[in-house]
């Protein structure tokens, strides 16, 4: 609990430039926030809502990061918005901070991994990046702008 308190307070005191975070129902185990789509990415100009849930044994086990705003991305589950990437699975180490997790998610928006949830989006990402970026921009305009 102390670690989550410190991490949450650290993000409030030294905020990341493109995110906001708040507690859900004053629970340190459930955070909600917004992430501004990174500049020079197909998500630029979008505002993406997200939630992070922490297991009771955090940091021994990783948190789960969910996009609540629909986003066209191979590493985001199309039905529940959960992120699939190494940092949440075999790459998890208890010393990883929430700030690092958020930075990793932002980096994933710049550089998607074509080894995610959606076969269709994976294929498009791997074979036609221009069309992938076009679709991601379209979804950003449709779901994350206004």
Image (spheres, rainbow, N blue to C red):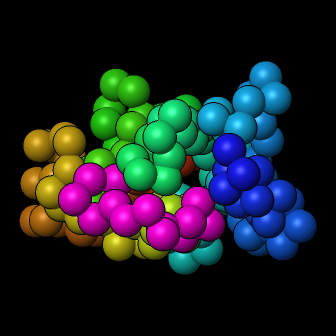
Q: Name the one closer to the observer, 3 or 12.
A: 3
The total of numbered circles placed on residues is: 0
Asked if residue 106 can be seen in this view, the reply is no
Dominant SS type (magenta): loop
Residue visible at 26% across and 53% down in the picture: 89
Residue visible at 76% across and 59% down in the picture: 6
Q: Name the one closer to the observer, 113 or 140.
A: 113
Residue visible at 39% across and 38% down in the picture: 82
Q: Which residues are magenta?
A: 88-100
Q: Of all residues shown, which one is farthest toward the right?
A: 13
Where residue 10 sits in the image (x, y, percent)? 79, 65
Q: Is residue 79 left or right of residue 116?
A: right
Q: Is residue 112 left or right of residue 125?
A: right
Q: Quadrant of the C terminus?
A: top right
Asked if residue 94 lies in the magenta stretch, the reply is yes
Q: Quadrant of the N terminus?
A: top right
Q: Name the one closer to the observer, 3 or 15.
A: 3
Where residue 52 sits in the image (x, y, percent)? 57, 41
> In this rendering, is residue 14 above or below 37?
below
Where residue 69 sits in the image (x, y, percent)? 55, 35
> In this rendering, is residue 103 above or below 61?
below
Which corner quadrant of the image does residue 92 belong to? Answer: bottom left
Asked if residue 120 can be seen in this view, the reply is yes
Asked if residue 46 lies in the magenta stretch, the reply is no
Residue visible at 13% across and 65% down in the picture: 126
Which corner quadrant of the image does residue 131 belong to? Answer: bottom left
Q: Name the one closer to the observer, 133 or 70.
A: 70
């Amino acid at each position: 609990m102390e670690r989550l308190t410190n991490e949450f307070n650290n993000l409030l005191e030294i905020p990341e430039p493109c995110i906001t975070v708040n507690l859900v129902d004053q629970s340190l185990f459930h955070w909600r926030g917004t992430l501004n789509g990174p500049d020079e990415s197909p998500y630029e100009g979008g505002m993406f809502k997200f939630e992070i849930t922490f297991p009771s044994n955090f940091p021994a086990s990783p948190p789960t990061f969910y996009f609540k705003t629909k986003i066209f991305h191979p590493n985001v589950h199309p039905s529940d918005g959960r992120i699939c990437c190494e940092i949440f699975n075999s790459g998890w180490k208890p010393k990883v901070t929430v700030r690092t997790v958020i930075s990793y998610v932002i980096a994933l928006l710049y550089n998607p991994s074509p080894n995610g949830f959606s076969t269709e989006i994976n294929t498009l990402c791997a074979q036609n990046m221009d069309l992938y970026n076009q679709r991601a921009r379209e979804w950003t305009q449709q779901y994350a702008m206004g």
